[in-house]
Image (tube, rainbow, N blue to C red):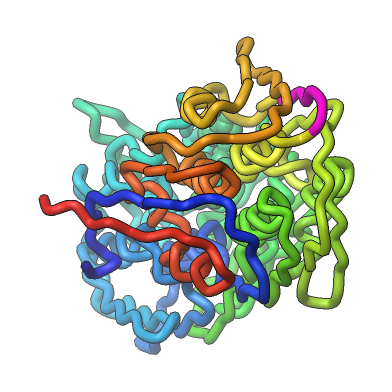
Amino acid sequence: MNRGEKGMGMFVINGGNKLHGSLFVKGAKNSMLPIMAASVLNSSDETINLYNIPDIYDMHVMKKILQSLGAEVHFENNALQINVRNLKSYNISDDLMREMRSSIFLMGPLLSKLGKVRVTYPGGCSIGPRPIDLHFKGLEAMGAVIREENGAITASAPRLIGTEIHLDYPSVGATENLMMTAVLAKGKTVIHNAAKEPEIVDLQNFLNAMGARIRGAGTETLRIDGVKDLGDCSYKIIPDRIVAGTYLMAAAITGSNLLVKGIIPAHLDAVVAKMREAGVVIQAADDSLEVIQSNLKAVETLRTLPYPGFPTDLQPQMMALLTLAKGDSTIIESVFEARFKHVDELNRLCANITVDGRTAFVRGVNKLFGAEVDTTDLRAGAALILAGLAAEGTTVIKNIQHIDRGYERIENDLKKVGADIERVQMLK
Ligand code: UD1
């Protein structure tokens, strides 16, 4: 199967193996997607080269969207070439919008480049309502006129004007969309209460390499001086901190010694701190983290927060880990409203978790037992893999197309370090 196709499949895991050796982490999905979208801002005829690109489903969707707009996009050996000299369309089809929430990232860049954009409401993971009001408010503040009719959203702006924007919440996507819009707007834009995620810094560095003038990424205030045009560049995407965290937790839940390489350890400070609190011994080096050993114990409270807090994208995996910890842990999901769909599935493996609103209570058990489970979203799927690696017996995880959205053939990495995991492809 080509990785750009969404195949129905399942993972069959025989739990209990220890992991050993090392894993290398590729580029971050959440950096790559806005950066691919930002590539349409190139006003030269030259090609943008992006490196360290993971071969994941969402990359292929963004590639398809760019191609549908008239861009030439080529992917080979974890590198992308994007040329937008023939970009014409400002209309993203409903089918493609539904495939992936990140399609909304194209709203700002297309509006900037073509003065008009037409989209529909984006799809994505089923982790609760994900409004886009903050994106709209910011675009309107810069002079866009946005109309919604029969599910279609049209924005137009003959000229975007820099302004002061205060985000009600430090939304990652809204911050990125507005940065991409402001780079070519007339005058200065200041974004207050901006998201501080490392992926925002990566987007700033990429846009500045194209000729933009942005300062402040990584802090809560972004200052953007509009420029007349942007050119091509070559750029290497930062490593994926969520994949790195998933692998560290895979080592911890199986009581293994594993080295996770090619990463920026500082991006995982909050995660490493919580894992240490949970009894995991972790050693840090310049570009790696190594799980040495684990004696899992409960953590008092784990609360997901915007960066530099504990990332919501590692909450399900950390919950899987805590199911086998000694004692009771409390997890509060403060970023998304309904991100506990993995709880019922973990309980099928004999975990003991109850939920009250946005709080989950995890009562540690001695053992998990293999069962058949279903995955409804990307990180929930990763959590089930971790639980399956630790469980006694065989775990079957269905609907793994969700996992392929953000992990490049995760089974190959895990097999390489000793896991017993197989992908079983279903005939359509
Ligand atoms: C990004 C990440 C996702 C991660 C999330 C939070 C990408 C491609 N995805 O998603 O993996 O889980 O950050 O770290 O980078 N909100 C509003 N109005 C808006 C926008 C957001 O109310 O206009 C709310 C959302 O409903 C949610 C919260 O803000 O409750 C955080 O969302 P946001 O930071 O925007 O996440 P995404 O950019 O969608």
Can residue 42 be seen?
Answer: yes
Residue 385 versus residue 168: which sits nearer the camera?
385
Q: Picture coordinates of residue 135 (x, y %)?
A: 51, 39
Residue located farthest toward the top when viewing the structure as drawn:
356
Residue at image location 31% in from the left, 51% down from the top: 116
Residue at image location 39% in from the left, 89% down from the top: 46
Q: Picture coordinates of residue 22 (x, y %)?
A: 66, 75
Rendered view: 9 above or below 300: below
Residue located farthest toward the bottom when viewing the structure as drawn:
46
Please tell me in which quadrant of the rendered image residue 408 appears: bottom left
* Left or right relative to 146: residue 407: right
Residue located farthest toward the left when viewing the structure as drawn:
428
Is 328 one of the magenta-colored residues? yes
Q: Picture coordinates of residue 276 (x, y %)?
A: 87, 48
Q: Quadrant of ligand 1?
A: top right
Q: What span is in magenta?
A: 326-331
Rendered view: 323 above or below 270: above
* Left or right relative to 362: residue 227: left
